[in-house]
């Protein structure tokens, strides 16, 4: 889904505001939401790779 969005995203879409699911008083832009998704995915990837490296090092 993210890849599809990135293939067609426009500056206008990135600037659009969406409801913050944690606090309705504050809106979030699509860009802010996208940044959060990408940062979370990157951190998950870092931990997975780190853990795989640790497992491989322990097996040696």
Image (cartoon, rainbow, N blue to C red):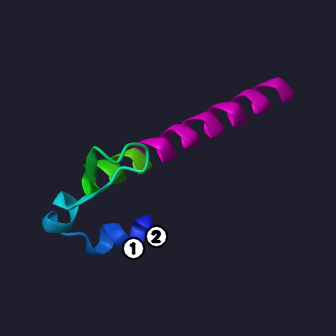
Q: Which mark is residue 39?
A: none
Instruction: Name the side, left or right, on which 14 lies relative to 5.
Output: left
Position in image of residue 37 (x %, y %): 43, 50
Q: Position of residue 7 (x, y in %)?
A: 31, 72
Spot occupied by residue 50 in the image (x, y as percentages of width and height): 63, 31
Q: Secondary structure at mark 1?
A: helix
Callout 2: 10 Å neighbours few (<14), some, many (20+)?
few
The x and y percentages for residue 53 are 69, 32
Q: Which residue does the image show at 27% across and 44% down from the upper left?
A: 26
Give the residue at x 41% y 49%: 38
- Nearer the observer, 1 or 53: 1
Q: Examine the rendered structure and indicate whether residue 32 appears above or below residue 53.
A: below
Please give the residue where the numbered disc 2 appears in the rendered image: 1
* Outermost front residue: 25
Considering the numbered disc 2 on the image, is that residue within a helix, a strand or a loop? loop
Specify the segment rendered in magenta.
39-60
Given residues 26 and 36, the one toward you in this image is 26
Magenta span: helix, strand or loop, mainly? helix
Q: Would you say the residues marked 1 and 2 are in contact, meaning their CB atoms lie under 8 Å apart?
A: yes
Residue located at (70% from left, 32% from top)? 51
Decide: is 5 above or below 22: below
**Label 1 Cα neighbours within 10 Å, binned few <14 / some 14-19 / many ≥20:** few
- For the C terminus, the quadrant is top right
Residue bearing the label numbered 1: 4
- As for residue 51 lying within the magenta part, the answer is yes
The residue sitting at 85% across, 29% down in the picture is 59
């Amino acid at each position: 889904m993210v890849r599809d969005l990135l293939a067609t995203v426009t500056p206008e879409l990135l600037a659009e505001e969406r409801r913050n699911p944690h606090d309705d008083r504050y809106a979030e832009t699509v860009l802010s939401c996208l940044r959060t998704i990408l940062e979370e995915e990157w951190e998950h990837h870092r931990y997975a790779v780190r853990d795989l490296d640790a497992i491989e090092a322990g097996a040696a």
